[in-house]
Image: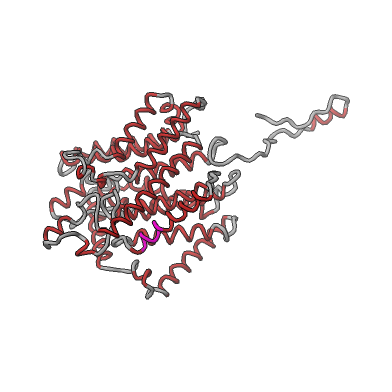
């Protein structure tokens, strides 16, 4: 349990079935954001009211109207409390922000994005079946995004046209493909955002096996083809998606290392360090290969490095408390930076300060460090696989945090962050992803010397007692 007294588990079968339905809908709708382009089919439709936000509202409404909200919130009290504190501080920072009106708007967008993470905690709760339904929804959504991307790459038709619209207008182009070549962004509105979702989904979907899901032969084939196509599209077609490629490589390294390196913490940490160093040297040695060139240094990297140095200076000049929520938009509007940060940690550091940024970074990186050090590998049946899955999702979040064009306003990013928290909590409880060790607690049960003397004197001899 995370804080508070233990609440009774939800045993209502109807509630559990409803939770599974909402969990699947939530997982499926995560990438159905502002790039769905509903206004292109329904005139005057506000694209801000995206399917992802509608499903999030439905999930939260059901959770709060049922007993589930109070029980689930108690399970994740520490994480939910920290999220509320972050949101409260973001709203308060509008007081010293350069543009208070823009800051309040940004705080509202942040609240809407974080609501998806809250929905994950409240809907999934501690029920393993609901967690599986959520991942199955993500799997279905990944398949939909792959299909849309294939159509985009083949036909050049897109659900929304906002990406590259300024360049199309400036250069008098017919479409963005005239400048970039074939490109896809699915329902997310930006190739970087699509790459970030692909990476997060690829990290999560294979965990179905860890959770004991038995798929049929056809389902396994379809899911395998979907994962392959997602990886191929991300590696070859997404514009400037180096974060996706490096994240995918890191995922592969984690899954490979976990099967060959020892469990003993010191040896495991040394093996991970040596393996990472070897991969880096290998990448430098084969840098002439086409796919390695795709992740090599470029003009875009120079721009991002210069931007990172600039925003770090701004964060330091703010005294570490942040310039206020919405600072990124204010800086772009004032011409102080050429584009958005493309970096979750930097944006949080500049807008909300180093303490908030460090807290979120620690939350994401902790499962990766624990896996590297060999902690939690023996926590019940499947403990090693669960630790590997957490580490893979953590890597995807770290890489995905430097991929999208706007991260802290991205609903699916916060939802996957919450999913990382669900993994951490559930793996420690009998009702979660793994089972506890069956070893009895024999502490302080050995008979004392006086008891032995009494037993020798003729008293009935008692065996060691096991405390509940």
Q: Is residue 458 left or right of residue 249?
A: right
Q: Is residue 231 in the magenta section? A: yes
Residue 100 shows in the view = no
- Image coordinates for residue 318, horizontal then vertical, percent: 23, 48
- Image coordinates for residue 368, horizontal then vertical, percent: 47, 52
Q: Is residue 327 left or right of residue 288?
A: left
- Image coordinates for residue 331, horizontal then vertical, percent: 17, 51
Task: Determine the residue positioned at 52% across, 46% down.
Answer: 215
Name the image quarter holding residue 163. Answer: bottom left
Task: Determine the residue positioned at 32% across, 52% down.
Answer: 148
Relative to 75, say whether 371 is above or below: below
Q: How is the image coloured?
A: secondary structure
Q: Nearer the viewer, residue 129 or 404?
A: 129
Q: Main secondary structure of the magenta part?
A: helix
Residue 55 shows in the view = yes
Q: Nearer the viewer, residue 275 or 140?
A: 140
**Image quadrant where one finds the C terminus:** top right
Relative to 85, say whether 395 is above or below: below
Name the image quarter holding residue 299. Answer: bottom left
Q: Which residues are magenta?
A: 229-235
Q: Nearer the viewer, residue 6 or 37?
A: 37
Q: Is residue 390 left or right of residue 195?
A: right
- Image coordinates for residue 195, horizontal then vertical, percent: 34, 55
Task: Determine the residue positioned at 12% across, 63% down.
Answer: 171
């Amino acid at each position: 349990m995370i804080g508070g007294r233990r609440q009774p588990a939800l045993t209502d079968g109807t509630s559990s079935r409803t939770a599974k339905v909402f969990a699947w809908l939530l997982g499926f709708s995560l990438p159905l954001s502002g790039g769905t382009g509903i206004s292109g089919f329904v005139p005057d439709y506000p694209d801000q009211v995206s399917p992802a936000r509608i499903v999030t509202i439905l999930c939260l409404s059901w959770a709060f109207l049922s007993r589930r909200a109070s029980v689930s919130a108690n399970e994740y009290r520490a994480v939910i409390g920290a999220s509320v504190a972050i949101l409260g501080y973001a709203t308060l920072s509008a007081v010293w922000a350069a543009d208070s009106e823009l800051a309040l708007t940004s705080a509202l967008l942040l609240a809407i994005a974080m609501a998806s993470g809250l929905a994950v905690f409240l809907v999934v709760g501690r029920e393993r079946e609901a967690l599986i339904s959520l991942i199955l929804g993500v799997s279905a959504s990944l398949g939909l995004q792959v299909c849309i991307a294939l159509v985009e790459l083949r036909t050049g038709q897109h659900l929304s046209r906002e990406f590259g619209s300024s360049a199309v207008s400036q250069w008098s182009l017919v479409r963005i493909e005239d400048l970039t070549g074939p490109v896809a962004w699915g329902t997310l509105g930006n190739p970087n955002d699509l790459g970030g979702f692909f990476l997060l989904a690829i990290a999560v979907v294979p965990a179905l096996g860890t959770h004991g899901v038995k798929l049929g032969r056809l389902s396994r084939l379809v899911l395998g083809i979907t994962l392959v196509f997602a990886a191929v599209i991300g590696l070859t077609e997404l514009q400037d998606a180096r974060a996706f490629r490096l994240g995918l490589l890191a995922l592969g390294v984690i899954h490979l290392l976990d099967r060959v390196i020892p469990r003993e913490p010191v040896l495991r940490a040394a093996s991970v360090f040596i393996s990472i160093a070897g991969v880096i040297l290998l990448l430098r040695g084969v840098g002439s290969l086409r796919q390695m060139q795709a992740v090599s240094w470029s003009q875009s990297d120079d721009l991002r490095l210069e931007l990172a140095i600039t925003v770090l200076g701004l964060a330091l000049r703010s005294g570490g408390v942040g310039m206020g929520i919405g600072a990124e938009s204010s800086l772009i509007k004032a011409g102080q930076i050429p584009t958005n940060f493309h970096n979750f940690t930097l944006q949080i550091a500049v807008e909300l300060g180093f303490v908030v940024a460090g807290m979120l970074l620690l939350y994401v990186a902790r499962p990766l460090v624990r896996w590297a050090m060999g902690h939690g590998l023996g926590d019940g049946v499947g403990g090693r696989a669960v630790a590997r899955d957490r580490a893979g999702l953590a890597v995807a979040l770290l890489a995905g945090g430097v991929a999208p064009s706007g991260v802290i306003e991205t609903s699916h990013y916060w939802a996957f962050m919450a999913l990382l928290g669900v993994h951490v909590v559930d793996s420690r409880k009998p009702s979660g992803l793994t089972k506890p060790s069956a070893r009895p607690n024999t502490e302080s049960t050995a008979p004392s010397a006086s008891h032995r003397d009494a037993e020798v004197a003729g008293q009935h001899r008692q065996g060691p007692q096991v405390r509940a």
